[in-house]
Image (cartoon, grey):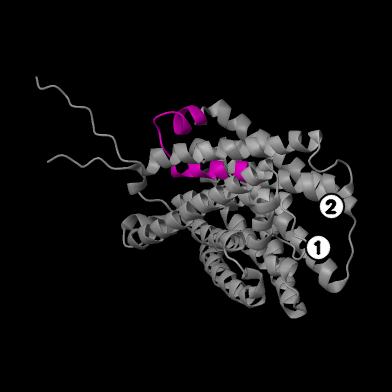
Amino acid sequence: MTTPFKRPADTYSPLYFLASLGAGGLSVTFFMFLFFWVPHPNQPVPVFEDIWAAFSQGMLPLQAAILIAWAGIAVFAFLNVKYLLWNLSALSAFKKTEAYTTLRNSNAETTLLAGPLAAAMTINALFIVGMAFVPMLWTIVEYLFPMAMVAFGLVGLWALRLIGDFLGRVLSQGGLFDVTAHNSFAQLLPAFAISMVGVGFAAPAAMSTTPATVAIALVISTFFAVAAVIYTLLAAATAFASMLHYGTHKEAGPTLMVIVPIVTILSILFLRQEHGLHVTFGVHGAEGETMIFLARMLSVQVVFLALGLLVMRRQGYFADFVLGPKTSPGSYALVCPGVAFAVLMHFFINKGLVASGAIDKFSVVFWILTAIAIASQVLMIALVIRLNRQHFGKPALPEAVPAE
C-alpha cells in the first residue's frame, strides 16, 4: 500500500497560527491607507461614512487607494479568519496525539502562544472590517468597546494560563528547560502574544469618550505592556547568550526579527494611551516628542531586521525554506516583521514627521518614505502567497518510477 502524499500543513504545528496572524497583519497595512489618507474629523479613526465621502468626492488617486484598501482588508481579513478556524480545528485534533504531550514537556511548549496571538489579531482585524464596511458603526461603538475588552480579556487569560503552565513547569524544578535549544528568539512568542492583547485593550483608551472605559482600558493595557516588556528583555537576554555559545538554530532564524512586531505593537499601544490621556484626562504631549519616540522605535526595528537578515543569509535560510524545496511552519514568522515595519513606517511618517511639521503631507518626501512602507507591504503579500502555496496548496503527485 502506498502512503498518500500530504501537504506540509498536514503535519501540524501550532506555529501555523502565524499564517492567520500574517494575513490579519496585512489587513492592517491596507487600513493604514484609510487611517492616514482619508479625513475623519469627527472621531479618531475613519469609519464607513468618512471613507464613502472621500471616495465619492475625492480625486482619482484617492479613489483608487480606497478601492485597493477595501479589497485588501476584505481578502486578508477573510484569510485571517479562515486560517484561525483551520488552526483551532487542527489544534483540537493535535491535542489527542503523543506529539502534543511531547510538545507540552519541551521548550516548544511556548509555540502554543501562537493561538492567543492569532486570536487577538482576529479581534483587531474584525474591528477594522467593521470600520471599513459597516455603516453607522460609530453610533453603537460605546457598547462595542466593553464587549471587545471582554473578548481580549478571555484571550489574555488564555495566554496567561499557557505562560503560567510553561513557567510553572520549568521554574519549579531544574533540568526541564533545554538551554542548548534556546539558541533563537522563539521564546519571545509569549511576549508577542500578550503585547497583542495589550494593544487591543488600548484601543478603547484612544477611542472611547466614556471616562470609566478609558481608565479601565489604560490600566489593563498597561499591565499587558509591562508584562510584555519584562518577558521580552529576559527571554531575549538569555536567548542571545545561548546563540553566542551554540549559534542560531537555522530553522528558527526568522525569530531573530520577532522584536520588530513587538516594537510596532507596543508603539501603537503607547500612542493609543497617549491619545486617551490627552483627550479624556487632559495630559498633553508634544508632536516633536512623538516624532523622536517613533524614530527610536523604528531604529530598534532596523537593527533587528539587519541582524536577522544577516544571520539567515549566512545560513542559507531563504534558499532552503522560502525559495527552495524545504518547508518549515516557522517561515510564517517572516511575515510579521515586514508587516510591522510597514505599519510603523506609516505612523512615523504621519504621526511623527507630518504632525510635527518636519515634512508636508503628500509632498515628494512624504511619498518617497511612504513608498518604503508600501514596498515592504507588497513584499509580504508575495511572501504570504508563496508560503500558502508551499504549505497549504494541493500536494504534488510523486514522480512515477519506471519498473525495472
Closer to the camera, 59 or 328?
A: 59
> Residue 193: horizontal and vertical position, in percent?
58, 58
Query: Around disc 2, counting alpha carbons within 10 Å, would you say few (fewer than 14), some (14 to 19), or many (20 or more)?
Result: many
Q: Is residue 183 visible?
A: no
The residue labelled by disc 1 is 274
Look at label 1 and name its amino acid. Answer: Glu
The residue labelled by disc 2 is 290
The CA distance from mark 2 to mark 1 is 10 Å
Tell me the tag on residue 97. Answer: none
As for residue 360 lying within the magenta part, the answer is: no
Asked which secondary structure carries label 1, the reply is helix
Query: Going by the picture, which residue comes out furthest to the top?
Result: 404
Q: Specify the quadrant of the image occupied by residue 305.
A: top right
Q: Residue at x 15, y 39 (%)?
A: 2
Is disc 2 in contact with disc 1, using a CB cutoff of under 8 Å?
Answer: yes
> Residue 96: horizontal and vertical position, in percent?
32, 62
As for residue 333 lying within the magenta part, the answer is: yes
Q: Specify the quadrant of the image occupied by residue 314.
A: top right
Query: Around disc 1, counting alpha carbons within 10 Å, would you say few (fewer than 14), some (14 to 19), or many (20 or more)?
Result: many
Q: Is residue 38 visible?
A: yes
Q: Which portion, as a residue range, is magenta?
A: 318-341
Q: Residue at x 56, y 39 (%)?
A: 380
Magenta segment main secondary structure: helix
